[in-house]
Image: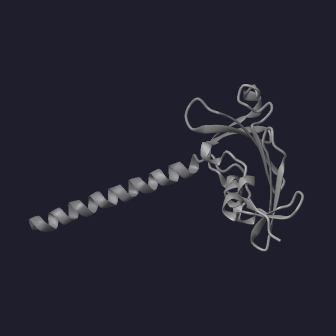
Amino acid sequence: MKRAARQRLWLLLAVLALLLLAGWQWQRDARHANGNLTTLDPATVTYVALALPGAPAERYGKRDGHWWRIDGTPTRAVDARLNDLADTAAAPVLSWRPASDFETAKIGLAPPHAVLTLDGQTLEFGEASVTGPQHYVRVGQRIALVSSRYVPRSPATATTALH
């Protein structure tokens, strides 16, 4: 076998080994994934309610592909902002633990810092964790740790009245 052919064979074997290793890692990561906050598909969410401390609750409904504030006078909301809130349904969870493992007051869930309801599924947001830019979220009887990117803030500042 010529030298060039031998080098190509070794290169091909190295690439094949790297592909096998990457495939194994991908499957391993998929088996150990913690899932999402909810089973809801963000694209199908049609109702969003947000309660923040010191502010009245805000309720939004989606009709004809656009978000509207539905508590009081119908007001068109910024679709991108409400879609961000709906995307919280599919937020990747870093870890899950039973709610009984925590003192809810110590992690900011008694009372929660924000309550987000997406099509009837309630998510209660607490304090930031000490381990990084992550927040505690109560979903039913479990506590999730998610990226701080998903902590809701009021979309009310981005609404426009339509006449």
45 versus 56 height, above or below: below
Residue lying at 70% horizontally and 47% vertically, measured from the top left: 153
Q: Quadrant of the C terminus?
A: bottom right
Judging depth in this view, the residue of 98 and 122 nearest the camera is: 122
Residue lying at 75% horizontally and 72% vertically, measured from the top left: 65
Q: Quadrant of the N terminus?
A: bottom left
Numbered-mark total: 0
Q: Quadrant of residue 102?
A: top right
Q: Quadrant of residue 52?
A: top right
Image location of residue 66, percent across then percent down: 75, 69
Q: Answer left or right for 163 relative to 41.
A: right
Judging depth in this view, the residue of 110 and 9 nearest the camera is: 110
Judging depth in this view, the residue of 29 and 143 nearest the camera is: 143
Image location of residue 19, percent across then percent down: 38, 59
154 versus 160 height, above or below: above
Image location of residue 120, percent across then percent down: 84, 53
